[in-house]
Amino acid sequence: MEGSAHDASPHVDTTLTFSSAKETVPLPYVWSYGMGAESTAAIHRMLTHPDVRPATVARDFANLVIVIAQTGDEWSTTGELVEQHMLPLLRKHNVRLVEVARNGPTKKDGITVLQDTRQPRHLHLDGVFKLSDENRATGTLPQLGGVRKCSQKAKGAPLDMWRANEFGDRQYFHAIGFNRDEYTRIKRDKAYSMGGRRIPTYPIHEWRWTRQDCIAYLKRELNVDWEWPKSCCRQCPFAGCNTAGWPEQLARFIALPNEAVQHVIDEYACLALNPRSGLFGPGKSLITRLQRDHATEVITLAAQRMRAMPWAVYRVRRYFSAPASAIRSLERVLVADRLLVQAALEEISDLVGVKLVKNAEITGAPVRQGDRDTHRRLWLRKRTDGAYPAMEEFYVTAPAEAVDKALDSFDTTWTDNTDKLLSYMERRTDAAIAVVRQAISRGANNTAS
């Protein structure tokens, strides 16, 4: 066990108040509600068991604010449970609920307050700008490891912005549902003070409750025989990356195929643009797991939808300055229906004189039991592992979800490092693409006439 309750969340001065000439009121007490078992259990216990309510929360809960950041990709069943079991409790105690969502991919896009009420009846799970909207446009997926940038963007940033707008320079308590075993996350979170305005507190950790304690509490208090599910986005790699978490996520993909299908398509497109980008790591794709575990309905539905979608021939270039440090250029060179796009890549391959490669090993994937690269690629340059700087360039077909994107400096960097052979192959490929485009244009004109 790491740390202690005292180390993680020292007792705060419960006399902290906001004073004015007319009145003295307690500081705002803000709960970041993720809708999972831990925060649900903690909020439920605070509202129904006065003996454990923090002294910094007013007896009538007037200073308590429950804030939810909607990513737009939460499973509908989670929202239904919150509406059924938690919103009535908030209405009963007249607790203020605020829902927020970001308006776009950057902070300057701002946020939308979806609702701000003491009598909530419904949630707005769709949000405004979905996390998956951003991933789809860039042809990427949330990644394992690191600092969970996806969560920071879709949850942390909107919540921070709302609190800054709401409280300005005023101090407030900020409660987060980290459990007994999450001292490392608490230690990192405590360093974020927002200029001294934010006073973090971790009730569940102070109670020494584990996640299982929270689940057991909810089963007992709600008088149910099922476990409160993990709150997560449908495309969350953390929710199914281990043996313990995958069965719950798999059950959702099976039970809710219409909600899950777009994320299967997204991973297929993402793998086309980067074979190392399986949702659970290189060679560890969501699609393979679903096939292995017989989630046939969502796989079939994804295949049906992809057949009807516009497709593109993508040109993908990456320049690696160091391991795991790359800049990328993504370009759609042709957009049409699936069969035409796939035939176009075949023709470009023939004209260039380079065979398409399929079922190759994936760099960085496990040698055994790992996926192979099922996408057909026209490789102009493969990078050499361990040698930097390095370059790779290929053409591939995929659903036309991702948009053209590159840093302003990319072309200069690429040109400065392109050797004569690669330059020759690029000119040859450009000429082949021009021929194929002309053939397609003539065919379209002949059909129209």
Image: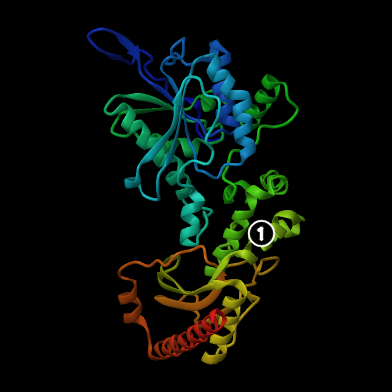
Is residue 4 at least partly visible in the picture? Answer: yes
In which quarter of the view is residue 18 placed?
Answer: top left
Residue 331, horizontal then vertical, whole percent: 44, 72
The residue under the point 35% across, 37% down is 161
The residue under the point 58% across, 20% down is 88
In which quarter of the view is residue 158 placed?
Answer: top left
State whether residue 384 is above or below residue 182.
below
Q: Name the amino acid type tagged 1.
A: Ala
Q: Looking at this view, is 378 or 1 the one in front? A: 378
Residue 308, horizontal then vertical, whole percent: 62, 64
Is residue 361 at least partly visible in the picture? Answer: no
Residue bearing the label numbered 1: 302
Q: Which residue, as the protein is rendered here, is positioned at the far left? A: 21
Residue 434, horizontal then vertical, whole percent: 45, 86
Tell me the quarter of the image containing the C terminus.
Answer: bottom right
Q: Which residue, as the protein is rendered here, is positioned at the far top? A: 22
Residue 65, horizontal then vertical, whole percent: 44, 23
Q: Which residue, as the protein is rendered here, is positioned at the far front? A: 449
Q: Looking at this view, is 205 or 333 the one in front? A: 333
Counting the numbered discs, the total is 1
User: Dot 1, crowdedness within 10 Å: few (<14), some or many (≥20)?
Assistant: many
The residue under the point 70% across, 32% down is 227
Tell me the quarter of the image containing the N terminus.
Answer: top right
The residue under the point 60% across, 28% down is 83
Would residue 58 appear left or right of 304 to someone viewing this image? Answer: left
Q: Which colour scheme is used?
A: rainbow
Circle 1: element type: helix
In which quarter of the view is residue 22 placed?
Answer: top left
